[in-house]
Image (tube, coloured by chain):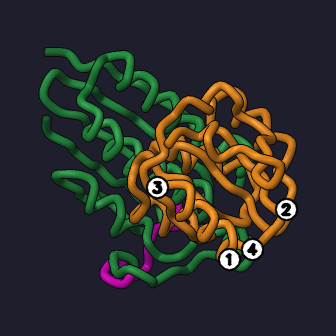
Amino acid sequence: MKPYTMDFDVKARDFSSAGESSSKFRKTLLMLSIPSDIVRRASIAAYEAEMNIVIHSYGGKMHFEIYSDKIVIIADDTGPGIKDLELAMKEGYSTAPKEVIEMGFGAGMGLPNMKRNVDNMEVVNHDESGTKIVMTINF
Amino acid sequence: MKVKDILSHEFTLVAGEGGIEKEVSNVYVCDLLSFVMSHVKSGSAWVTIQTHVNVIAVAVMTEISCIIICEGEKLDENAKEKADDENIPVIAFNGSSYEAAIKLSEMIK
């Protein structure tokens, strides 16, 4: 079956429209009557991934695929990558700048929180050319 | 308890009136958005001093019932618009987060 897909550009450091792609994705899941616990998990994972692009990257894209039995969320940015992925996966480790931390972000919970809310998370690429993360939630 | 039951001369609604019929089943106090994303239960009243627009997005994603902004901090204008659009009630409170939590605890009993 062909999935229902959605694509969004995410700008670096644009905090005023940050979260819009995740918000539209969430509204679509609700419209499709996806179970509420799945909607919540998918929304949190998508929002964390989108905020990572806003905070840490030079800009990127969010891509969503909604199937009858699973949801795939792909966050794909244009760099600068994640130097130490093992450290980045640890709760509390953060490379966020001061002004972002003052907004309440950058507590080092993003990647671990994404992983916790999905059934499978794969960091496909994290070198300087960009970070690509594929997350799947099964129904 | 519903969001509207919290409202008084001390807890004043500043945005998101469309959401005041939502049920409040819990209270969560935190200013770190990432912590809120990973720990808050849906249906919570979220007590914070953060006032920017991303607070509303966090509330939407985690299905928070209302946001209570303490210490007399003012909600940013674009956050107010977003709260109205998304029906997330935002309530202003002049005291500390601690004082807000005590009062909410009395109400939610």
Q: Residue drawn at (72%, 63%), measured in percent from left and top? A: B50
* Left-right relation of A37 to A69: right
Q: What element carries label 3?
A: helix
Determine whether label 1 and label 4 are within 8 Å by CB.
no
Q: Earlier in the sequence, mark 2 or mark 4?
A: 2
Question: Can you identify the residue that label 3 sits on?
Answer: A48
Chain that appears orange: B
State the CA–CA distance, disc 4 to disc 3.
Answer: 28 Å
Question: Can you identify the residue that label 1 sits on?
Answer: A97
Task: Give the x, y percent position of residue A72.
Answer: 26, 38
State the CA–CA distance, disc 2 to disc 3.
Answer: 26 Å
Determine whether label 1 and label 3 are within 8 Å by CB.
no
State the CA–CA distance, disc 1 to disc 4.
Answer: 27 Å
Question: Can you identify the residue that label 4 sits on?
Answer: B96
Name the amino acid, label 4. Ser
Q: Is the residue marked by circle 3 packed among few (<14), some (14-19), or many (20+) residues within 10 Å?
A: many
* Left-right relation of A98 to B46: right
Q: Is the residue marked by circle 1 packed among few (<14), some (14-19), or many (20+) residues within 10 Å?
A: few
State the CA–CA distance, disc 2 to disc 4.
Answer: 10 Å
Question: Can you identify the residue that label 2 sits on?
Answer: B73
State the CA–CA distance, disc 1 to disc 3.
Answer: 16 Å
Q: Which of marks 1 and 2 is in front?
A: 2
Check the residue under mark 4 and report the chain it is in: B
Confirm whether circles 1 and 4 share one chain.
no
Give whichever of B60, B106 is nearer the camera: B106
Q: Chain A is drawn in which colour?
A: green
